[in-house]
Amino acid sequence: MIYRLPLRNLFFPVILAIVAPSCEKFSGEQEIPAYLDIDSIYLTTDYDSQGSDSQRITDAWVYIDDEFLGAYELPARFPVLKSGSHSVKIWPGIKRNGIASTRVTYEYYTPVTKTLGLEPDSTTLAGAVRTTYQTTALFVWKEDFENVAVSLDTTSRSSVAIQRTTGPPLTFERSHSGMAVLDTVHDFFECMTHTEYTIPSAPVFLEMNYNTSTELTVGVFTYGTTILYQTPIITLHPTAGQWKKIYIDLSTTLYAYSGMKTYRVYLGAFNAAGSAQSVVLFDNFKVVTRKSK
């Protein structure tokens, strides 16, 4: 038996996660703050084992001498009531599910530690901040559409096939991206991962790049012994021709129903109302969780 939840009108909790200390809250003998400048955080990957280095790191969560200072939207310049040489740890931060009010550190990126000198009434530049994936990160599924064999299958309900782009301007990077073209006759697209994956005990994130002219729903099929659920997690809005990167938290949905053992990721889209044609582009899928101890 299949239970399907509606594709649209999803509700998301609002959680305020950004902390921005001000000079008025300083305490102690030092009255004039130093300033720390963090322009951006980059990602370095081993493409064969970890996939693309595409990222959307929006925030820096900063610790000085292991004391939490605050979370700052990048690029950031913020006051620090310390002077001299200090250990600065920078955790890469993301918008979970693309929502500004649910900013979190991304636990599968490695924090960057630097020793920096701070001087009152002066700005210290953090310099190039480059992160990598944690050594404990496990890539359950990757798909970059560079191979002829694609690890996504259309469902029996889909009237649209998966295509591969052949270069600019539709390709995000390298030689190919995934594509679905919908029209007034072939107006529904749905695909899912070819393989079922075991639901782990660790958090699970889906990373993806996308560029769509119609709403695109991302969710999971979860499978028990005699039952399965199809549950949408997020509906992505049209991107006006721009590629975007998102980190989708699958964990809550995977653990929502007791007795579920495995899952598949799925995508779904309808041709946009009033449009002769809609194009959905996607690339660099990664399902990331933590290696078992």
Image (cartoon, rainbow, N blue to C red):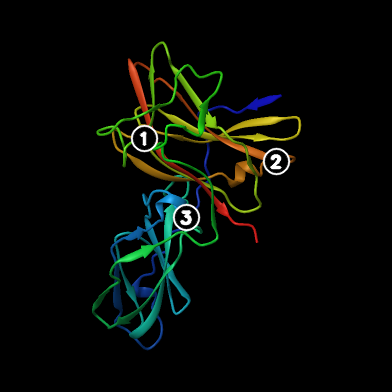
Q: Which mark is residue 64?
A: none
Badge 3 amino acid: Leu
Please state which of the two labelled residues, at mark 2 or mark 3, is closer to the viewer: 2
Is residue 85 in sight in this rendering? yes
Q: Quadrant of residue 168?
A: top left
Q: Which residue is mark 3?
A: 16
Query: x and y percent of residue 96 in the render?
Result: 47, 49
Query: What is the secondary structure assignment of the residue under circle 3?
Result: loop
> Marks 2/1: CA distance?
31 Å
Q: Nearer the viewer, residue 216 or 173?
A: 173
> Residues at badges 2 and 1 in contact (C-beta under 8 Å)?
no
The residue at the point 50 percent across, 34 percent down is 151
Which quadrant is home to the C terminus?
A: bottom right
Residue 9 visible here: no
Which numbered disc flags the more N-terminal residue, 2 or 1? Answer: 1
Measured in 3D between alpha carbons, the distance from the residue under mark 2 to the one under mark 3, in whole angstroms, is: 33 Å
Which is more toward the observer, 287 or 269? 287
| Residue 218 picture location, percent across and down | 50, 34
Would you place residue 58 above or below residue 171 in this image?
A: below
- Residue that label 1 marks: 177
Residue wearing tag 2: 261
